[in-house]
Amino acid sequence: MARRKKIYEGKAKILYEGPEPGTLVQYFKDDGGAFDDEHREVVEGRGVLNNRLSEFFMTGLNGIGVPTHFIRRINMREQLIRAVEIIPLAVVVRNFAAGSMSDRLGIPEGTALPRPIVEFYFKDEELGDPLVTEEHIIAFGWASQQDLDDMVALALRVNDFLSGVMMGVGIRLVDFRIEVGRVWDGDFQRLIVADEISPDSCRLWDLRSGARYGKDADGSDPHKLSEAHTEVARRLGVLPTNVTHATKPTLIN
Ligand code: C5P
């Protein structure tokens, strides 16, 4: 049997050549995710849930006219996506202070920000994905001013959509990260949402109890992390309501 060609392997995902030019197959692994090395745990079923959740969010975004790389889910762990040229920046949107913003600026976690704040981080693992300014981005040629404007607009639309969806299931979207890719439609290039949108790249707090479900669920405890992913999927209706344990999720079609 012919082996398909692996294009890239990261901590959480593998990209294979797709069935048609301009497409790729994105495979979700159980380990990795957006967590630091020390918190990297293998959570059985997490890849399956992230595949489902990313499908759910990206389908919704496509539906309201926010372009993404998502084409369709292929199976439990794989989805067909558009091949893009990834911009080497992580785009973070924050609605409430938390994480590195609280650490850097001394703002107590949970403080509502006066408006959503968009930040750019240079994707370089060895450097620890440092925060960069628009000046750095333009001077070093990582993106143009037009790209930056488009990325901010895209990120804010994703923020409105995701905040609303999560609010509808009693969860506060504290902050999240997206990646953006460039595609060409004929002579025109445009930017679309790429990579994944899942609890691994979001900070999600329960509106009432304050319980943490996303990025800062207890990453040192694989069981808690797995519960957090399952809870988000359950509330969004991506899992049937009778699933109580995350390790072998039964998925509805
Ligand atoms: O750690 P920090 O507060 O900067 O994270 C902001 C947001 O970016 C969080 O929602 C986190 O999930 C996301 N993030 C990520 N991958 C990283 C760093 C942060 O998805 N490597």
Image: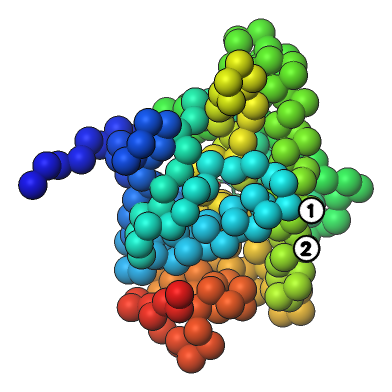
Measured as percent of width and height from the top left, residue 104 is found at: 71, 39
In the rendered structure, which amino acid carries the disc numbered 2? Gly
Within 10 angstroms of label 1, few (less than 14), some, or many (20 or more) residues? Answer: few
Left or right placement of residue 21 versus residue 72 in this view: left
**Residue 29 % position (x, y):** 33, 55
Q: Height in image: 213 above or below 136?
A: below
Tag on residue 164? Answer: 2
The image quarter in which residue 178 lies: top right
Q: Position of residue 242 (x, y in %)?
A: 48, 91
Depth order, front residue of 71/100: 71
* Residue extending furthest toward the bottom: 242
Q: Position of residue 228 (x, y in %)?
A: 52, 72
Q: Amino acid at mark 1?
A: Asp
Visible residue check, residue 239: yes
Quadrant occupied by the C terminus:
bottom left
Q: Which residue is mark 1?
A: 160
Q: Is residue 28 above or below residue 192?
A: below
Of residues 183 and 52, the one nearer the viewer is 183
Compared to 251, does 66 lie above or below? above
On screen, residue 62 versus residue 106, left or right, reads left
Identity of the residue drawn at 48% across and 64% down: 52
Q: Residue furthest top?
A: 139
203 left or right, relative to 247: right
**What is the crowding at mark 2: few (fewer than 14 residues within 10 Å), some, or many (at least 20)?**
some
Q: Within the image, what quadrant is residue 247 found in?
A: bottom left
What whole-number distance in Å separates the C-alpha atoms at marks 1 and 2? 6 Å
Examine the rendering and report whether any part of residue 199 can be seen. no
